[in-house]
Image (tube, helix red, strand yellow):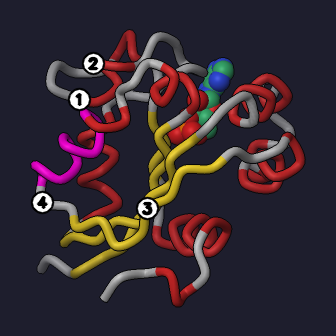
Amino acid sequence: MQTLQRTFSIVKPDAVEKGATGDILHMIQEKGFRIIGLKMLEINKQQAEGFYAVHASRPFFDSLTTFMSSGPIVVMALEKDNAIADLRKLMGATNPANAEEGTIRKKWASSIEHNAIHGSDADETARFELSYFFAGYEFCK
Ligand code: CMP
Protein backbone atom coordinates (compact mmCIF):
# COMPACT_ATOMS: atom_id res chain seq x y z
CA MET A 1 0.00 0.00 0.00
CA GLN A 2 1.22 3.50 -0.85
CA THR A 3 1.09 6.11 1.89
CA LEU A 4 1.42 9.85 1.55
CA GLN A 5 4.83 10.77 2.89
CA ARG A 6 6.94 13.90 3.36
CA THR A 7 10.62 14.19 2.63
CA PHE A 8 13.24 16.89 2.78
CA SER A 9 15.67 17.90 0.06
CA ILE A 10 18.50 20.39 -0.52
CA VAL A 11 19.77 21.71 -3.83
CA LYS A 12 23.43 21.94 -2.78
CA PRO A 13 25.77 24.92 -3.38
CA ASP A 14 27.42 23.33 -6.44
CA ALA A 15 24.09 22.94 -8.24
CA VAL A 16 22.82 26.40 -7.26
CA GLU A 17 26.10 27.87 -8.53
CA LYS A 18 25.68 26.05 -11.87
CA GLY A 19 22.17 27.49 -12.32
CA ALA A 20 20.64 24.01 -12.05
CA THR A 21 17.97 24.85 -9.46
CA GLY A 22 15.15 25.34 -11.97
CA ASP A 23 15.95 22.12 -13.82
CA ILE A 24 16.15 20.11 -10.59
CA LEU A 25 12.81 21.51 -9.36
CA HIS A 26 11.32 20.63 -12.76
CA MET A 27 12.66 17.05 -12.59
CA ILE A 28 11.20 16.68 -9.08
CA GLN A 29 7.79 18.05 -10.06
CA GLU A 30 7.65 15.91 -13.21
CA LYS A 31 7.88 12.83 -10.99
CA GLY A 32 4.74 13.90 -9.14
CA PHE A 33 6.18 15.47 -5.99
CA ARG A 34 4.22 18.36 -4.50
CA ILE A 35 6.45 21.14 -3.18
CA ILE A 36 4.92 22.20 0.15
CA GLY A 37 7.85 24.33 1.33
CA LEU A 38 10.68 26.06 -0.53
CA LYS A 39 13.35 28.61 0.33
CA MET A 40 16.82 29.75 -0.68
CA LEU A 41 19.26 30.61 2.07
CA GLU A 42 22.87 30.41 3.19
CA ILE A 43 23.89 28.46 6.28
CA ASN A 44 27.05 28.89 8.33
CA LYS A 45 29.49 26.11 9.21
CA GLN A 46 27.92 25.53 12.63
CA GLN A 47 24.44 25.20 11.11
CA ALA A 48 25.79 22.72 8.53
CA GLU A 49 27.44 20.73 11.33
CA GLY A 50 24.13 20.55 13.19
CA PHE A 51 22.32 19.33 10.10
CA TYR A 52 24.92 16.64 9.33
CA ALA A 53 25.60 15.73 13.00
CA VAL A 54 24.97 12.06 12.19
CA HIS A 55 28.14 12.15 10.05
CA ALA A 56 30.29 13.91 12.70
CA SER A 57 32.76 11.03 13.02
CA ARG A 58 33.27 10.59 9.26
CA PRO A 59 36.56 11.71 7.69
CA PHE A 60 34.66 13.90 5.19
CA PHE A 61 32.66 15.79 7.86
CA ASP A 62 34.80 18.94 7.89
CA SER A 63 34.97 19.16 4.13
CA LEU A 64 31.23 18.41 3.72
CA THR A 65 30.15 21.08 6.20
CA THR A 66 32.58 23.64 4.74
CA PHE A 67 31.12 22.93 1.30
CA MET A 68 27.50 23.12 2.49
CA SER A 69 28.17 26.52 4.04
CA SER A 70 30.05 27.84 1.00
CA GLY A 71 27.12 29.42 -0.84
CA PRO A 72 23.36 29.56 -1.32
CA ILE A 73 21.30 26.38 -1.02
CA VAL A 74 17.63 25.70 -1.78
CA VAL A 75 15.74 23.68 0.82
CA MET A 76 12.49 21.91 0.05
CA ALA A 77 9.69 20.04 1.76
CA LEU A 78 8.15 17.51 -0.62
CA GLU A 79 5.04 15.38 -0.44
CA LYS A 80 4.10 12.29 -2.43
CA ASP A 81 3.22 8.63 -1.97
CA ASN A 82 6.49 6.87 -1.12
CA ALA A 83 8.31 10.24 -1.22
CA ILE A 84 11.50 9.20 0.59
CA ALA A 85 12.40 6.22 -1.59
CA ASP A 86 11.12 7.83 -4.80
CA LEU A 87 13.23 10.97 -4.29
CA ARG A 88 16.34 8.89 -3.58
CA LYS A 89 15.72 6.97 -6.79
CA LEU A 90 15.36 10.20 -8.76
CA MET A 91 18.53 11.62 -7.13
CA GLY A 92 20.68 8.63 -8.13
CA ALA A 93 23.69 7.15 -6.34
CA THR A 94 25.62 9.34 -3.86
CA ASN A 95 28.71 8.98 -6.04
CA PRO A 96 27.75 10.33 -9.48
CA ALA A 97 30.14 7.83 -11.07
CA ASN A 98 27.56 5.18 -10.10
CA ALA A 99 24.43 7.24 -10.86
CA GLU A 100 22.01 5.93 -13.47
CA GLU A 101 21.00 7.80 -16.62
CA GLY A 102 17.98 10.05 -16.02
CA THR A 103 18.88 10.83 -12.40
CA ILE A 104 19.60 14.28 -11.00
CA ARG A 105 23.12 13.35 -9.91
CA LYS A 106 23.98 11.80 -13.29
CA LYS A 107 23.04 15.11 -14.89
CA TRP A 108 24.35 17.64 -12.37
CA ALA A 109 26.76 16.12 -9.81
CA SER A 110 30.50 16.32 -10.32
CA SER A 111 31.85 14.33 -7.34
CA ILE A 112 30.74 12.40 -4.26
CA GLU A 113 30.88 15.65 -2.27
CA HIS A 114 29.69 18.06 -4.94
CA ASN A 115 26.73 15.85 -5.68
CA ALA A 116 24.03 18.44 -6.41
CA ILE A 117 21.24 17.26 -4.12
CA HIS A 118 20.48 15.83 -0.69
CA GLY A 119 17.38 13.80 0.21
CA SER A 120 16.31 12.27 3.52
CA ASP A 121 17.07 8.56 3.83
CA ALA A 122 14.33 7.47 6.28
CA ASP A 123 11.15 8.65 8.04
CA GLU A 124 12.93 9.68 11.21
CA THR A 125 15.64 11.63 9.38
CA ALA A 126 12.99 13.30 7.21
CA ARG A 127 11.21 14.53 10.35
CA PHE A 128 14.46 15.86 11.84
CA GLU A 129 15.59 17.48 8.61
CA LEU A 130 12.20 19.09 7.82
CA SER A 131 12.06 20.57 11.31
CA TYR A 132 15.68 21.77 11.05
CA PHE A 133 14.79 24.12 8.20
CA PHE A 134 11.04 24.67 8.43
CA ALA A 135 8.57 25.67 11.12
CA GLY A 136 5.29 23.75 10.90
CA TYR A 137 3.35 26.84 9.83
CA GLU A 138 5.53 27.27 6.74
CA PHE A 139 4.17 24.16 4.97
CA CYS A 140 1.46 24.70 2.36
CA LYS A 141 -1.71 22.70 2.83
P1 CMP B 1 24.13 13.58 1.33
O1 CMP B 1 22.99 12.82 0.76
O2 CMP B 1 23.96 15.04 1.50
O3 CMP B 1 24.52 12.95 2.75
C1 CMP B 1 25.82 13.02 3.28
C2 CMP B 1 26.80 13.54 2.29
O4 CMP B 1 28.14 13.27 2.57
C3 CMP B 1 26.56 12.88 0.94
O5 CMP B 1 25.38 13.33 0.39
C4 CMP B 1 27.84 13.26 0.20
O6 CMP B 1 27.75 14.54 -0.36
C5 CMP B 1 28.83 13.27 1.35
N1 CMP B 1 29.67 12.10 1.29
C6 CMP B 1 29.32 10.83 1.46
N2 CMP B 1 30.39 10.01 1.35
C7 CMP B 1 31.44 10.81 1.10
C8 CMP B 1 32.82 10.59 0.88
N3 CMP B 1 33.33 9.36 0.90
N4 CMP B 1 33.59 11.67 0.66
C9 CMP B 1 33.09 12.92 0.64
N5 CMP B 1 31.77 13.19 0.86
C10 CMP B 1 30.97 12.15 1.07
Q: Residue sitting at 31 percent across and 31 percent down?
A: 92
Observer-nearest of 85 and 108: 108
Say left or right for 25 vs 66: left
Residue 35 at x, y percent in the picture: 30, 65
Observer-nearest of 15 and 122: 15
Above/below status of 100 relative to 52:
above
Ligand 1 is found in the corner quadrant, namely top right
Q: Residues within 10 Å of mark 2 (few under 14, many from 20)?
A: some
Q: Do the residues labelled 4 and 1 touch (CB within 8 Å)?
A: no
What predominant SS class does the magenta segment belong to? helix
Residue 27: which disc? none
Say which residue label 2 marks: 107
Q: Is residue 128 magenta?
A: no
Q: How crowded is mark 3: few (under 14 residues within 10 Å), some or many (20 or more)?
A: some
Number of numbered discs: 4
Residue 38: which disc? 3
Q: Are marks 1 and 2 in contact (CB under 8 Å)?
A: yes
Amino acid at circle 2:
Lys
| SS at badge 3 | strand
Specify which label sits upstream in the sequence, 3 or 2: 3
Q: Residues within 10 Å of mark 1 (few under 14, many from 20)?
A: many
Q: How crowded is mark 4: few (under 14 residues within 10 Å), some or many (20 or more)?
A: some
Say which residue label 4 marks: 32
Say left or right for 81 vs 37: left
CA distance for labels 3 and 1:
21 Å
Q: Residue sitting at 35 percent across and 82 percent down?
A: 140
| SS at badge 1 | loop
